[in-house]
Amino acid sequence: MDIRTVLKKELITLLRLENIDPEDIDDAAPLFGEGLGLDSLDAVELTVLVQRLFGVVVENAEAARTAFASVGALAEYIEARNGTTP
């Protein structure tokens, strides 16, 4: 399964996004603000999810801003660190 699809499914489950299917989430859409509307608490949950599923640690706030820009950016961040999918 494609890493982007895995991320979308996990986001929907973890964040309890109602009435959203993985294909409804654009890879380039922002995760925060205008996009999915995630907030700082969601960022913490997303950080834990990435570490649990992929063994990738988001090192600091600057890395988080880059990694959590979109599903596509997060997939690239994960692939660059270990290239592994669940």
Image (cartoon, rainbow, N blue to C red):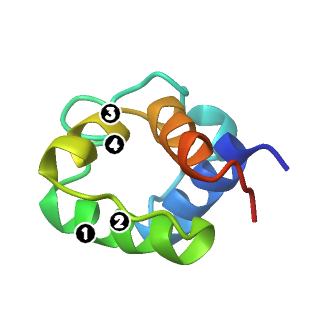
Residue under the point 18% across and 56% down: 60
Between residue 21 and residue 82, name the one nearer to us.
82
Residue labelled with disc 1? 44
Q: What residue type is labelled 1?
A: Val
- Gap in angstroms between the C-alphas marked 4 and 2: 9 Å
Name the spot of residue 2 as percent of width and height, x first: 79, 43
Tell whether label 1 touches label 2 (CB within 8 Å): yes
- Gap in angstroms between the C-alphas marked 4 and 3: 4 Å
Task: Find residue 68 and name its label.
Answer: 4
Q: On screen, 50 above or below 30?
A: below
Residue under the point 49% across and 63% down: 56
Residue labelled with disc 3? 69
Q: On screen, 29 above or below 18?
A: above
Name the spot of residue 64 as percent of width and height, x first: 25, 48
Dot 1: element: helix
Dot 2: element: helix
- Gap in angstroms between the C-alphas marked 1 and 3: 14 Å
| Crowding near the residue tagged with mark 2, few <14, some 14–19, many ≥20 C-alpha atoms within 10 Å | some
